[in-house]
Every structure is written in C-alpha cells, then in structure tokens.
Amino acid sequence: MKRFGALFAELDASTATHAKVAALVRYLREAPDEDAAWAVYFLAGGKPRQLIRTAQLRALALRASGLPEWLFEESYQAVGDLAETIALVLPAPTEGGAELGLHGWMTQRLLPLRGADEATVADAVLGWWGELDSLGRFLFVKLVGGGFRVGVSQLLAQRAVAEFAGLDPKLVAARMMGYTSGQRAPTAQAWRAIVAPAAGEGAAARDPSQPYPFFLASALAGAPEATLGEVGDWFAEWKFDGIRGQIVKRAGRAWVWSRGEELMTERFPELERLAAAWPDGTVVDGEIVAWDALAAPLPGFETPGRPAPFATLQQRIARKTLTARVLADAPVGFIAHDLLECGGQDLRGQAQHARRAALEALARACAPPLPCSPLLDAPDWATLAAWRARSRELGVEGLMLKHRDGAYGTGRVKRSGEGERLAWWKWKIDPFTVDGVLIYAQAGHGRRASIYTDYSFAVWNRAPRDPAEAQAVVDAIAERRPANPQGLQLVSFTKAYSGLSDAEFQAVDAVIRETTLEHFGPVRSVRPTLVVELAFEGIARSKRHKSGVALRFPRMLRVRGDKPLHEAGTLGELLALLPGA
C-alpha cells in the first residue's frame, strides 16, 4: 500500500502529462504483477464497490478521534473531503502491522468485508487505521467508500502501460477493453496478458467476451460545409439518445458492453436474444435504446416504432430486478450503426462504406431482424440542416457525420490534417435553456472546498405580474415567512455545479456570502438576487421533485447580470418542453 500511496501522491502533485506517465512507468517497473494489476485497474477508471456506508465511516472516525461531532463537521466543511478529514483527525498510528501491497489489501482485507456485519467491519477498520499513516488512511477510506479518484485519464494510463511494455498504445487499449468492468477482479495473469509482447494478435488471442475500443465522435462547431467539404463524402445518420454499446457474439455466447466498459448483458436480455442466432465472430457497434413499438417510424427507418425518450431507458437501468412488468413497461432495442468484426475478421481498418455494406448484409440475414441506423440521403448541407432542425420533434439529438472512406479508430481522432477529414462528428441540436434563480449553495470539493460552487435553482410558479410582486416574494423569503401556496412563489427545480469559470465562481461566491439567510449543515440558503442561464439536454416528468420535472445534464452557461428577477424562467416554460406537451 505504501508503494501505491507514493504513486498516488506523485500523480496528485503534478499536472504535467509526461511527469504522470513517468511516475506510472516507474511504479510498474518496481511493483509485483499482482499489485500492478490492481493499480492499473483503479487508475484506468475501475470503481471499487462501496464496502462501508459513509455514515459508518463518520461514526468510526468520531469514535477513534474523540472529537465532538460539531468539531468534526466543521473540520469536514473546511477540508471539503471526507477521506482527507478522517486522515487528518485520527491519532498517530500505534501499531506496526505487516506491510501489505495493494493486492494484499484488496484480496485479503477489503474484499472479504463484503457482507460482514457492522461490528466486524468496525473492528477491522479501527485496527487497520492504527497501522496506516495519513496517506494510507486517506487511500483506505477512498477505496472502502467507493470514491477513489485520481487525476489520470484512461488514455494516460494506457499510454503509460504501452511505454512500460514497449507496445503500441492502440494495442494496449484493445487489450484493456473490459478490464475495468468490475465483473471480475484484476489478476496478475490478466495484467501479464496486457503487457505481453505483440505476437499473434487476433480474435483467437483475446478473451471471447472482449469488445473493441470505441471510436468516439467530436462535437462539430460551426457550419459543416466550412469544415467537412462536400456533403457527398459523408454518411449522415440520426444521433440517438441512448447508451452507446457493442454486442459481441463469440464462442456460442453473446455479451453486451457499454461505452463505459461495463458488462450489461444481464440488464438487457432482449439484446442477448437478438444476437443468439448471429454467427460466431460478430461484433456490432450501436445504440441501446428504449423502444416504443407503437410510435410512427423515424424518417428513413423501415423498422416499426422508434426510440422512446431516454427517461424510459433510465427507469429500466435503475431497476435491479427485471420483472415481467419492468420488461413490458420499458422494452429495449438496439440500433446498429457499424460492424467491427465479421466471421472473426477485424473490419476496423476497412473504409466506412465497406463496413456499412457488410453491416447491411448481416442485418438482412438476421432473424430476429437487426435494425440499422438509417442513412439520410441529402443533396446538400442545407437539406441536412433541415433534417437536424427537426431532431427534437423526432426525439433524437441531432446528426452523426461519418466520412465514407474513414476507418474505425480508437478513442477520439484529433482535429488536424487527415484525422479531421476522416473523423466522426456529432452535429447536435442546441440544448434547452432556462433562466433560474439561485436559492441554495454548497461548497465544492478538492480545490473548490473553500468556495461555494454547487447551486440549487428555482423558477417562478407563474410569471410575476410586475417587479413589485416578485420583490414581495423575495422579501418574504428574507423574513422567513412561508410561501403562499395560492400565490406567486419560487419553485426549486434543479442543481448545477459546472459551466462557470473560476473567476465567475469567485464572484458568485462573494454574493452568496453577502446574501446568506440560513445555514443547514454545509448548505446555505440565500436571498434570491442572481439569475443564471442554465442549459440541459432533456427534461422528463418526475414524482421525486417538487417541481414535477427532472433535467438531464444541467449546467450553467452564464450569470445573467442583465436580467432582473421577475424576468427569470417559469415552471410553465419547463412543462412546455416536456415530450408530447
């Protein structure tokens, strides 16, 4: 654990990519294979399952430190991170336990805690805290609490592994697909397979369930004709609002993977049945969507029905048990848009048009039918722009643009030279926007722990008649008078914590401190004074929210210093954006 702790400290202290890569390579050269397997798992994005509830960790920290609860909470608010707070307030270690590596900690200590009763967990945690220094305690809390994060991207981790092993980073990326899925613990054997010399690579050399690295699209800014040239060089498809996935059929079995490298076969039995009759050695890339079989087909679609709103798919994902009712209420479909492997042959190096022809041939031979993403025929960019303008009406997010001659790459192709011409582009519609009123604030975490960056926003339940009526509501809030349920009021509807610059956050933080009305633990209620323009990708009805709606990916665009409170958004504006409204 000490070696991994030293690596974590070195990575956390640097912002330079080359320094992070060098630190990782040094670690991999020194660490045993079983420790390297776990380290790369975490650094590449593997998420440890929460083994201990946060409330129990806090209670144990209070017990071990002897601090009163109010002082611990004040310390937590000042530090901004629970693991760091616990590491700082615990007494100095008194025991000299045997030094275990990362593999030993995970397999001999942490994983066996799963399912243990609280008393057993408490005894173990208190004893291990006595062995660890401050950094070790910090990492321990992160690992058992399920919140381990470090400033290393998956791409950077793969680059370091490639440099350590003397391999092509693309080969390492392919070998690591599924490594962080959480379905199986990383092992020394799996690690050695990743860094083995490049020889005999092919379908037979990989685990049959392993998908390919996903090719990612870049956001298209500006007019496509200025960047992409002739419209005839490009395939245009709908951008569906679902979960990007790959279905892998090998060795007589089918596996379903998400873009986040999560194995999702058991969550989507419909897709396992869809691929059951496919020939072995088939890998299809596409979109997992909720399916409305009764809706009119999308333009260009021959399959009956169309994708349902993402909120329907979200309901399905949230269910741990797939009852017959759940399967009936939120049926799932798969829209194929690329064929990556056919007959065990890797097709990714072939041109897009050749892979498309092979995909359509596969779809024609499939039973049950394999729906393919329709290609939109357009003589010019203006026609495609008109299709894009209908996206929201049709329940899609915009268009995908793929060069006819482009290969299937790894990750996101850089926007330069030939790479730009042959990349995939997502030409999305503009997001929804609404002007919200800031009513609550909470401090951030990490480097934002000292400023208020996490905000709650409200809209008017109806448009105020005039500025005076809106001001009367603000005055009532400042005087702690309850809202009139029959009158004008501000209704909380969403939270947001991203989108502003550091300077803008500092400016908003100053206003929050000047206008604070009450404290509720880490949260401050403020006198409504600021209007902020918010963007979001979608909206759905929600029984859990007072406003009756839930937003998808809300973020802040700008502080509207030019807009008075009475001109902020209304609940009616949001309800009008609901699908089918």
Image (tube, rainbow, N blue to C red):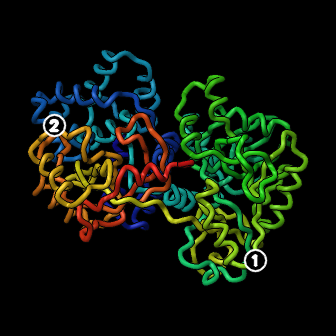
Answer left or right for 99 relative to 422.
left
Could you tell me which residue is drawn at 57 percent across and 48 percent down? 580
* Disc 2 to disc 1, C-alpha distance: 60 Å
Which label's residue is closer to the chain start, 2 or 1?
Answer: 2
Q: Is residue 383 left or right of residue 527?
A: right
Quarter location, residue 69: top left
Q: Amino acid at mark 1?
A: Asp
Residue lying furthest front: 465
Which numbered circle lies on residue 233? Answer: 1
> Does 256 sit left or right of 91 as displayed?
right
* SS at circle 2: helix
Residue 288's label in the rendered image is none
Q: Position of residue 576 (x, y in %)?
A: 47, 52
For the point 28% across and 25% down, the residue is 56
Locate residue 389 relative to residue 140 in the image: left or right. right
Mark 2 or 1: in front is 1
Give the residue pinned by disc 2.
73
Looking at the image, which is closer to me, 396 or 412?
396
Q: Is residue 340 visible?
A: no
Q: Amino acid at mark 2?
A: Glu
Instruction: Give the answer, above or below, for where 225 lies relative to 130.
Output: below
